């Protein structure tokens, strides 16, 4: 499923990065984390939101059941479902003033808004995963430490109970430089109406 997503994104020329549990599995285990029920990726909002890239939505709709994500904002990403699995596609918004990228996380998360320094995504970094190359943030070990804490390299015995709920990259909502007008005004996403 992740390889199909990668093929569609590569075909449309849209870069994306592994994130969260998928990044953890790729870096730490060289595989998906046992028992993880989803795949996590991020894409820069400016690369993923129309009008310039309608093609990717056609590609994704042909392969997956597509649901928009509404994490306290009108549009923060997509959930792509197929055969009982899903990929969470989180949008990263540029904040030029702070030289960072901001992502809205799921409502069940303790880190609703996360901020990553721009240098982590502005330079290409790759990992061999599933026998192909995937983009990952610069300094992946530091990223994983910031997400999961100092013991990120030790697999959890029961990931659903033993959570490591801290994140250094927190912030409050601001209007981001590359956010489309319908997001700024809080109106519905035209893609999913």
Image (cartoon, helix red, strand yellow):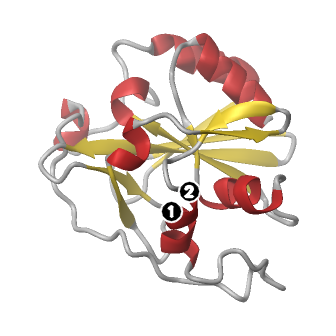
> Which residue position is annotated with label 1?
143
Under circle 1, the secondary element is helix
Tag 1: Cα neighbours inside 10 Å, few (<14), some, or many (≥20)?
A: many
> Which residue position is annotated with label 2?
140
Residue 83 found in image quarter: top right
**Residue 171 image point, x, y percent:** 26, 68
**Residue 41 image point, x, y percent:** 59, 44
**Residue 114 image point, x, y percent:** 37, 63
Q: Residue at x 58, y 52 (%)?
A: 19
Asked if residue 178 can be seen in this view, the reply is yes
Q: Is residue 16 left or right of residue 100?
A: right
Residue nearer the viewer, 75 or 162 = 162
Residue nearer the viewer, 34 or 80 = 34
Q: Is residue 28 left or right of residue 120?
A: right
Q: Residue at x 55, y 18 (%)?
A: 56
Vertical side of 62 occupied by 71: above or below: below
Q: Quadrant of the N terminus?
A: top right
Under circle 2, the secondary element is helix
Q: CA distance from mark 2 to mark 1?
A: 5 Å
Instruction: Please tell me how many numbered marks the rendered image carries.
Output: 2
Q: Residue at x 78, y 41 (%)?
A: 129
Q: Is residue 132 left or right of residue 46?
A: right
Residue placed furthest toward the left: 97
Vertical side of 24 occupied by 122: above or below: above
Tag 2: Cα neighbours inside 10 Å, few (<14), some, or many (≥20)?
A: some
**Residue 115 image point, x, y percent:** 33, 59
Q: Quadrant of the C terminus?
A: top left
Q: Determine whether label 2 and label 1 are within 8 Å by CB.
A: yes
């Amino acid at each position: 499923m992740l390889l199909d997503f990668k093929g569609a994104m590569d075909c449309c020329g849209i870069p994306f990065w592994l994130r969260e549990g998928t990044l953890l599995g790729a870096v730490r285990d060289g595989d998906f984390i046992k028992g993880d029920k989803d795949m996590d990726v991020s894409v820069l909002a400016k690369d993923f939101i129309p009008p310039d890239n309608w093609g990717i939505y056609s590609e994704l709709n042909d392969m997956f059941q597509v649901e928009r994500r509404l994490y306290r904002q009108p549009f923060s990403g997509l959930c792509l479902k197929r055969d009982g699995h899903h990929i969470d596609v989180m949008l990263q918004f540029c904040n030029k003033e702070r030289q960072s990228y901001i992502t809205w996380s799921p409502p069940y998360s303790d880190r609703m808004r996360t901020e990553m320094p721009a240098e982590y995504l502005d330079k290409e970094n790759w990992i061999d995963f599933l026998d192909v190359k995937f983009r990952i943030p610069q300094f992946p070990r530091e990223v994983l430490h910031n997400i999961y804490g100092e013991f990120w390299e030790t697999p959890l015995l029961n990931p659903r109970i033993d959570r490591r709920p801290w994140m250094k990259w927190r912030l409050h909502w601001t209007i981001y430089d590359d956010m489309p007008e319908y997001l700024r005004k809080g109106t519905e996403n035209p893609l999913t109406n």
